[in-house]
Image (cartoon, helix red, strand yellow):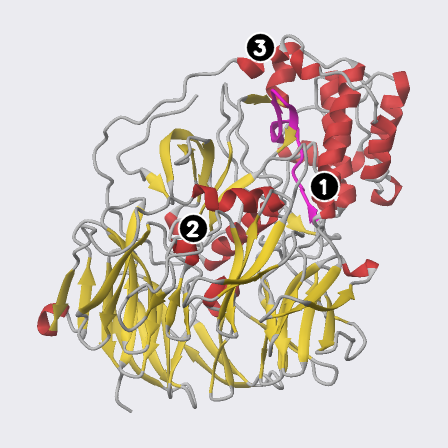
Amino acid sequence: MTDPLLASDPRRLGGIRLLGRLGAGGMGQVYLGRTPGGRLVAVKTVHEHLADDPHYRERFRREAAAARAVTGAHTAPVLDADPDSPVPWLATAFLPGVTLGRAVAAGGALRSPAVRALGAALAEALTDIHAAGLVHRDLKPSNVLVTADGPRVIDFGIARAVHGQALTETGAILGTPGYLAPELIAGGGPPATAAADVFALGAVLAFAAAGRNPFGTGTVAILLFRTVHEEPELSGVPRASGLRDLVERCLDKDPEARPTVRTVLRALRDPRPPLWWREEPVRSLVLADDPVPEPRDAPPTTVRKAVQEPVSGPVRPWRGRAVARRGLLLAGGGGLAGLFGYALLRPTPHGGGSGTSWDPVVRTGAAAGGARWSLEPRSGEVDAVLVAGASLLVHGTDAAGSSSGVVEARAGADGAPVWQRKADGRASGWWGTADGLLLAPDLALPAVALATGSVRVRKPQLAPTLGWFTSAGGLLLDSYAQTSSEWRTRATDPATGTVRWTAPPGPATVAPAVFGDALLLAPVPGASTRLRCVGVKDGVERWTYPLAAGDGGALAVCALPDGFAVLTTTGRLHVIGADGRAVRPVQPLAHPDLPAGSTALAQSAGKLLVAAGNRLYGHDVRAPWSRPTLGLDASWPRRLGGARAPVTGDGLLLHWRDAGTLEAVAPATGGVRWTAPVGGGVAQVPPVVAGPVVYAAAGATCTALRLADGRALRSWPLPDRVSELAADAAGWYARIGKASIRAYDRPSG
């Protein structure tokens, strides 16, 4: 059942209309929502005070990326996510169903053929999860949803990449006692592997066959003790067809002695499995469905001041309140299905041009509270800024949660309006400028002339689902979904709308790299291991490059001064020349911790840089180095097309070493040139370099520092935390939440 929305709850997230509350946990609230097309979704959010903590935000980003990396018939599709939102959220399919725990509680233990069919389905789901380089870590009856189409594995709240770095405090135990593998209980043990999921699978099958946990009931300490030191109670598991023997092997204390998931799948596979979820009483439980409520008019949303203090205490896995009569797909497989659904959730604005009710208040001089000028929406929100020459581009909506918005240019000197155009109501994480044009196809905008706001052409029509876009050689390059498994890459002249070329259908690709007039396309992990290089101007294939079996798949690519670099999911670096040949032998990273969604690749001063989780690596043959860093979100801003790039200036690499310390590093050696403490709260946004000055915001304070030596020039207190920072030669701009923009002059000195 769903509970009604509270007055303080949002009414929309992105393009999703919220209908009610499904549950809550320590990490956030879960809502039932409906997309503009009418599809029901479950929307999981993060509490605002947790979103203020970069470590929590990094965890949410990783969870969303993990969910999208998995595809399969027995996992749940992720449809949309916005980890960069002030309140991060993730939307998944919402299907009627019940948890396996409730099905067994209501109807008793499953018959042996049903248990075998269940085990085959779960083993197939784990095969897909592990193929994406992930370990679930928390498989249990409440994370198995029985739907009208069969069982689904859900909730990747604490999933971790096999080569990834867990977002937990030292000594914290993630998982559920009774299903947690013994090797994960003892401190200082090995990281979770696929064998830990096999242990949990055995425990789930024992529960389904006997109707009880194989390690009984009791306190957490008792269950953990039994798991490590005692044998499971399996008397209720039938011996027929070798089921008990298989469960015993899955529950072996030694992870090396357990069967692989594929072995389990082969042992349980049945050419004609029973459709046990269509038999009573499970069928009635699955079909029992409360009407979905439509929200009534409610009091306006309460405005809450963002918490500025860092959150203390260990990071704990999210646990939602049980949903009585409906199953909730919180996470699971996404992959191409998630990408295909991504843009379908985005509302399309009504045409272009001006004409919205967006009419913000602009103040200058003394009325701006010490700023050069300030901008505040009268009733809507402002959610993105971008410096473009002498103008500041602003994206906003005329009402909170509105499905339509506006992009306008404001004069950097005094905030005066220059031009305005209608756009999608959702903030862009991908927009950027190239060749005098604003490019923001994810905002449903055509190419817009920066100087005048004019549109030269309104074709071609934007693809419904964008994988990525970038600009090269005067062309707009993008990747879009033709079907859920076939993607196309094309090049368009933004000045005329002419499509120069379109590549044949193929797998989805990661954000590409451009070297001269060459475009490197690397399929997403699990799709293919063959990289293709095509011409920017004509799309003609020039060469291909195969990855080795031990590489996994391509995680990220970037251009180098003499070719391309490719980082694989197993932490191996390939350096490829412009002719498609390897420039040097494949090199592994010293510490291949590459969390999904939190890894980026770039080059600076000829040095290959890798940001992965909470480490920053500089890599080459002679002098590799690594430094601690706050994470991708806080240190590497988004550029055109959403690609992440490091902050550099005057030969230095700038990043947040921790939540209150800015660090300048020499990219060639990793040597620290200077460090500067920045007070005011927790750093959440990347620093910005403008000439000889670097601006750094932490909490509700922005500090200007001299780029050469890190000496503080001036600090400004602000009314609330800084959500976005930009700068030009005249000074700097801060977006304060979604409430205002403030422009300040550059400090002297």
From the top left corner, tell me how far across and down residue 146 is, in percent.
Answer: 62, 23
Q: Earlier in the sequence, mark 1 or mark 2?
A: 2
Per the image, the residue denoted by label 3 is: 284
From the top left corner, tell me how far across and down residue 90 is, in percent.
Answer: 48, 43
Q: How much space separates mark 3 and mark 1, taking CA atoms?
A: 29 Å
Q: Are marks 2 and 3 in contact (CB under 8 Å)?
A: no
Q: As displayed, is residue 95 above or below residue 569?
A: above
Q: Could you tell me which quadrant the C terminus lies in? A: bottom left
**Mark 3 closeness class: few <14, some 14–19, many ≥20 residues within 10 Å:** few
Q: As displayed, is residue 127 above or below residue 449?
A: above
Q: Residue at the location (14% across, 69% down)? A: 369
- Magenta residues, start to end: 134-151
Per the image, the residue denoted by label 1 is: 128
Q: Where, by quadrant of the figure, is residue 46 drawn?
A: top left
Q: Where, by quadrant of the figure, is residue 622 drawn?
A: bottom right
Q: As displayed, is residue 496 above or below residue 138?
A: below
- Give the left or right position of residue 523, taking residue 548 as reference: left
Per the image, the residue denoted by label 2 is: 50
495 or 216: which is nearer to us?
495
Q: Earlier in the sequence, mark 3 or mark 1?
A: 1
- SS at circle 3: helix
